[in-house]
């Protein structure tokens, strides 16, 4: 790993204020900013969001005046932890799991929210290919 002397050589032409702050930040963190980009690992799983449509409230049919809401309420969201590396496969597996588990299988959309690292998968005790509510 490059130390502060190498960083000082690489930032020789930089603005002095920027150079000093960068050197101080790297010395404090004991890392270099470009090493974080190199050491990035691929995700081991995903947090998937399922959007469930709102229930539509209809006025009564018996002719009485409707006092309540005439607009549908907001949709609800459910989140699942998925131990599948591919985001598309994780979304498909979550849709299938949600349809199997719930009685209302109506889904407006499924999207991945964020990555899960292998350490997070291990902490959640997820097996490969498993989908579990968050």
Image (cartoon, grey):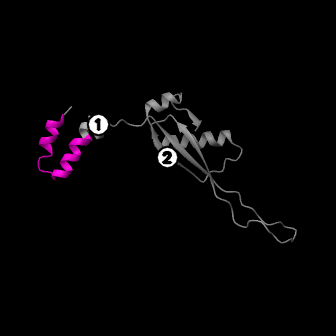
Q: Does the rendering let one see residue 116?
A: yes
Placement of the C terminus among the 4 image quadrants: top right
- Asked whether 94 falls inside the magenta stretch, the response is no
Q: Tell me if residue 129 comes above or below residue 34 in the rendering.
A: above
Q: Earlier in the sequence, mark 1 or mark 2?
A: 1
Gap between marks 1 and 2 measured at Cα: 29 Å
Q: Is residue 129 left or right of residue 78?
A: left
x and y, in percent, of residue 38 in the image: 28, 38
Q: Is residue 11 left or right of residue 101?
A: left
Q: Main secondary structure of the magenta part?
A: helix
Residue with the mark numbered 1: 29
Closer to us: 94 or 35: 35
Mark 1 packing: few (<14 Cα in 10 Å), some, or many (20+)?
few
Residue 19 lies in the magenta stretch:
yes
> Residue 111: horizontal and vertical position, in percent?
52, 48
Q: Residue 113: x, y in percent?
A: 49, 46
Image quarter in which the N terminus is found: top left
Magenta stretch bounds: 3-25
Does 75 sit left or right of 41 as displayed?
Answer: right
Tell me where residue 60 sits by quadrant: bottom right
At mark 1, the secondary structure is helix
Q: Residue at x 74, y 65 (%)?
A: 69
Please name the residue that numbered disc 2 is placed on.
Answer: 113
Q: Position of residue 94 (x, y in %)?
A: 57, 41
Q: Residue at x 19, y 51 (%)?
A: 17
């Amino acid at each position: 790993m490059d130390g502060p002397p190498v960083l000082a050589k690489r930032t020789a032409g930089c603005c002095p204020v920027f150079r000093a702050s960068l050197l101080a930040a790297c010395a404090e963190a004991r890392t270099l900013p470009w090493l974080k980009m190199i050491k990035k690992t691929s995700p081991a799983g995903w947090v998937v969001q399922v959007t469930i449509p709102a229930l539509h409230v209809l006025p009564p049919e018996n002719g009485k005046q409707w006092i309540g809401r005439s607009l549908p309420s907001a949709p609800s969201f459910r989140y699942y932890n998925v131990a599948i590396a591919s985001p598309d496969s994780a979304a498909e597996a979550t849709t299938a799991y949600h349809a199997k588990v719930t009685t209302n299988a109506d889904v407006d959309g499924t999207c991945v929210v964020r990555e899960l690292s292998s350490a997070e998968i291990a902490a959640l005790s997820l097996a490969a290919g498993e989908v579990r509510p968050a």
